[in-house]
Image (cartoon, rainbow, N blue to C red):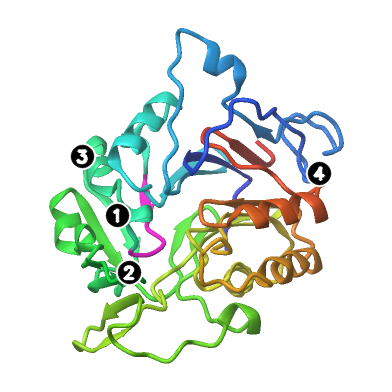
Amino acid sequence: MFQADSVTITVLVENQVDMLLPDQASPTGGDGLSDGHDGHGDDHCVTRYGLIEHFDPKRVPPQAENGISFLVEAVRGRHTLRVLFDAGLTGTVLEHNMRVLGVDPAAIDHVVISHGHPDHFGGIHRFLGLAGRRIPVATHADAELPRYAVMGDGRTSPVYNAAFGFGEVEKSGGIPVLTRDSLDLGWGVHTTGEIPREVAFEAGAAPAFSPGDPGLYQVSAEGRLRRDEVTDEMGLVVDVKDVGLVVLTGCAHAGVINTITQARAVCGPKPIRAVMGGFHLGFPTTPAENVGLTTNALAELEVATVMPMHCSGLHTHARLARDLPSHYVQPAVGTVLHFGRS
């Protein structure tokens, strides 16, 4: 199985912008970064779109929205693979931030959409139009199945994922690649495929299914109404030579620890150099104790770099910053992380 020599990950869409965050050295270090540092110096593994950029009149500041999108650039020798993992909530913000951060949509080789929720696929049509050519879009075959949201006050959002119909994606220039299995994109980059829910606290006890009760619902391919457990979600994993695995999550509906376990099932039992993305711990129905349980599990797994984003919740940030301060990275649009040798 091939590995990347290095990977660079740019946060294109995220819930927050923070121009006061500084560049920082590699959390826990020791991965052979490109400038020869041992990881304990100022190697700038994590760089920011910061104060100077925000105050520079020649530049335009990036924008935040309640969504997520990464540019993943895996390098092996003289070759670079560029993958867009998720597309944010709106094409407006995704296009703006790509322009601000100097990302050429036409240079993207592959798109992966983690699951069929609008805060992850929302910018796909605008992106495909900007790319100007046909690009593979990998996702789960169930991602386009109709979804309904029923609020506690009785309001309903019907088929809120309608814009992610695979036929519409194809019309916009995408090539739908629908698989429940892991997909090898090249140079150590893989989708996780379906994520088994084996960790007890992440699987949880599913509430009794009663149509009409508040909650999220999905209509199955056979036409049956069911509770939406988001079984279509998958993550992305990059296997970096001499470094370990870099794991990206969309919302981690299946659980961030389950996602890490599946990443190792795909790439082997290697060290987890980083995990970043939505951890789903800020969702109102997620048990509060899962924040501590997840923090403890990440420590036990010796995850070197942890960057919770998007739906992770304030309590998660506070707990990780307190308990794993040398591993925690605060996210913001424009953050760039680099792992491995260039």
Q: Amino acid at mark 1?
A: Pro
Sequence-first tag of 3 and 2? 3
Which residue is found at the position 29% from the left and 73% from the top?
141
Horizontal and vertical percent for residue 115?
38, 64
Q: Quadrant of residue 131?
A: top left
Disc 2 from disc 4: Cα separation? 49 Å
| Front tag of 4 and 1 | 4
Check disc 2 and report the residue beneath it.
153
| Front tag of 3 and 1 | 3
In this view, which residue lies farthest toward the top? Answer: 57
Disc 3 from disc 4: Cα separation? 40 Å
Which residue is found at the position 38% from the left and 47% from the top?
88
Q: Nearer the viewer, residue 135 or 122?
A: 122
State the SS at label 3.
Answer: helix
Q: Amino acid at mark 4?
A: Gly
Horizontal and vertical percent for residue 130?
24, 35
Chief SS of the magenta region = loop
Disc 4 from disc 1: Cα separation? 35 Å
Q: Residues within 10 Å of mark 4 (few under 14, many from 20)?
A: many
Check disc 1 and report the residue beneath it.
136
Disc 2 from disc 1: Cα separation? 40 Å
Check disc 4 and report the residue beneath it.
29
Check disc 3 and report the residue beneath it.
129
Q: Which residues are magenta?
A: 109-116
Instruction: Name the image quarter holding the C terminus.
Output: top right
Whether pointer 4 and pointer 1 mark residues with C-beta atoms closer than 8 Å, the reply is no
Sequence-first tag of 3 and 4? 4
Q: Amino acid at mark 3?
A: Gly
